[in-house]
Amino acid sequence: MVTAQALIIQVLTIIGIALSPAIIWLAFFLHEDENPEPVMLIIRTFLIGMIVSAPALLLQILVQMVTPNSNSILLGSIFIYAAIEETLKFFGTYALVNGNPDFDEPVDAMIYMIVAGLGFATVENIFIVASLMKSVGNVDFMEVGQMISLRLVGATLLHTLASAIIGYYWAKGIISQNRSHFIIIGISIAVIVHSIFNYLVSQFQDVSILIPTLFLVGVSFFVFSDFEKLKDIVI
């Protein structure tokens, strides 16, 4: 019989492990922000990223239900899944922070998109960690440790970078006063990056995670460069 105390410990363990990759990336980017954002708005944005994961999952299930089981169609599904996630992350963040007086610098667009992306990734991490819990109080910590390492440099970083790309182009739209044009470009590039990573994982996960990881490392150079460009711009 599972006791209430054991269940609480299990739930807290799952949440703590799932949050760890997001906390690391969040600490890095918030440290780089020279004008820190309000803590409560950061928390709300993180929660928005978590919340939009629910409709994203439902839409992906619907796509899966109507998708024939063939390799050519499944490749298209990878793109559709990525489009669903990136679009919902953007609109959730936009609805929350656009027009907020604390949203007052172009770099804020990248910050808040990154936070939302980390919230989204955390929900994925929770499900994965939960699946690795053999039973209450029985955790394969070696397996969980390997998973966290892969999530830190893999899927969590993917959501961070893809969201940051959207944020960068959102910021460019703010600067040029042509938001719609640049937002469409940003979402499109983020979807392409997301799709390429998912495709590489599907092709090489049984051999090595190195190839998709190297792809993200390459993307990260551009994202970090874009972040630095925006830090000194004031609107």
Image (cartoon, rainbow, N blue to C red):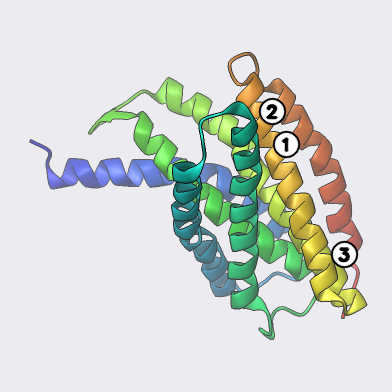
Within-10-Å neighbours for mark 2: few <14, some 14–19, many 20+: some
Crowding around mark 3 (Cα neighbors within 10 Å: few <14, some 14 to 19, many 20+) is some
Residue 75 position, x and y percent, is 64, 34
Closer to viewer: mark 2 or mark 3? 2
Which residue is labeled 2 in the image?
A: 200
Quarter holding residue 35: bottom right
Q: Are marks 2 and 3 in contact (CB under 8 Å)?
A: no
Circle 3: residue type: Leu
* Residue sitting at x 41%, y 41%: 127
Q: Report the residue at 36% width, 33% height from top.
A: 131
Discs 1, 3 touching: Cβ within 8 Å: no
- The residue sitting at 33% across, 46% down in the picture is 12
Figure disc tally:
3
- Given residues 85 and 44, the one toward you in this image is 85
- 31 on left or right of 74: right
Image quadrant assignment for residue 143? top left
Query: Is residue 126 placed above or below 176 in the rendered structure?
Result: above
Residue located at (59% from left, 53% from top): 85
The secondary element bearing badge 2 is classed as: helix
Image quarter in which the N terminus is found: top left
In front of the other: 214 or 231:
214
Q: CA distance from mark 2 to mark 3?
A: 30 Å
Report which residue position mark 1 lands on: 196
Q: Label 1 near label 2: C-beta < 8 Å?
A: yes
In terms of secondary structure, where does tag 1 sit?
Answer: helix
In the drawing, does residue 167 fall left or right of residue 79?
right
Query: Reading the chain from its start, which is encountered first: label 1 or label 3?
Result: 1
Q: Which residue is mark 3?
A: 230
- Of tags 1 and 3, the one toward the viewer is 1
User: Would residue 32 be visible to someone looking at this image?
Assistant: no
Element assignment for label 3: helix
Residue 21 percent location from the top left of the image: 56, 42
